[in-house]
Image (cartoon, rainbow, N blue to C red):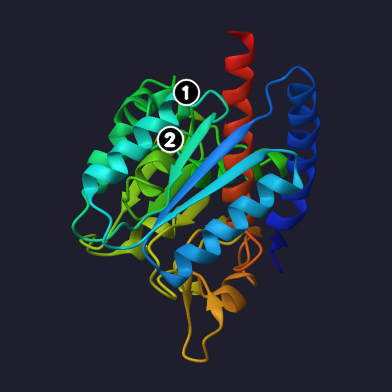
Amino acid sequence: MTAQLIDGNALSKTLRADVATRAAALTARGHRPGLAVVLVGDNPASEVYVRNKVKACQDNGLHSVMDRFPAALAESDLLAHIAKLNADPSIHGILVQLPLPAHIDSHKVIEAIVPEKDVDGFHVANAGALLTGKPLFLPCTPYGVVKMFEAHGIDLKGANAVVIGRSNIVGKPMALLLLEAGATVTICHSKTRDIGKHTRDADVVVAATGRRNILTVDMVKPGATVIDVGMSRNDEGKLCGDVDFDAVREVAGYITPVPGGVGPMTITMLLVNTTEAAERTAQG
């Protein structure tokens, strides 16, 4: 059996078309959705991400500004800039690209963004509200994965789900969303003694560690849904994920590729969150 591919590019296209329609309706009423992306320093990977986010906004009718600062920027200056964006009525979403230079406290920076413009869903108010199932915004990557489950009719009620990784950005919120959907959830991480012991019973596995081939074919139950959130490069410099894709796709029921899987969905859900923020503002 070869797994059915969950194509993030195709699903993104559909969702972005809906965003473009909603953005056009808002713009006609004088509420064009606006996203501010803040980049500090010159991390090459961050530059690519930011460029893609800005382009996605422009392609789908959103207003986007990119504020770029040198790595030596003082933390106080960055906080002052965020305060300015918080007060700007044309900006509905604020995204500070991580990682930040070592002298800047990223936690403090994220907390400086007002929760109603926290389209990344990282602010403690949104992260805490996720625990109760009532966040203003869902974090973009786990939100994108949920949309993938929905698009393919993957029923999570009663499913055994394993999340590999416990980051605040993907692992923890992903586990909460799976729980909310009715799955029985196990979180594995670098201290887990035998990850395969957990994944072999799993109907759904979400791998989000950034460590290549952490999930191999002997660790996957036949017919399982495998979502690969990880991204790294192999010895030849080719982009790959956390999953041994070629081998696992012969056993799994559904699988996401890298690239072209979860990546495009993350940016798409950022557009969805920004549009939603603008809709809330328009409703007053």
Query: Residue, x 65% and y 38% (percent of image)?
Result: 63
Q: Which mark is residue 121?
A: 2
Place residue 57 in its image quadrant.
top right
Q: Which residue is mark 1?
A: 136
Local packing at callout 2 (Cα closer than 10 Å; few below 14, some 14-19, many 20+) is many
**What is the residue that sits farthest to the top in this orientation?**
284
Type of amino acid at the residue the image marks with label 2: Gly
Q: Are marks 2 and 1 in contact (CB under 8 Å)?
A: yes
Residue 149 location, x and y as percent?
A: 63, 43
Query: Residue, x 68% and y 22% (percent of image)?
Result: 31
Observer-nearest residue: 137 or 21?
A: 21
Query: Residue, x 35% and y 43% (percent of image)?
Result: 172
Secondary structure beneath label 2:
loop
Type of amino acid at the residue the image marks with label 1: Leu
Observer-nearest residue: 261 or 264?
A: 264
Q: Is residue 16 visible?
A: yes
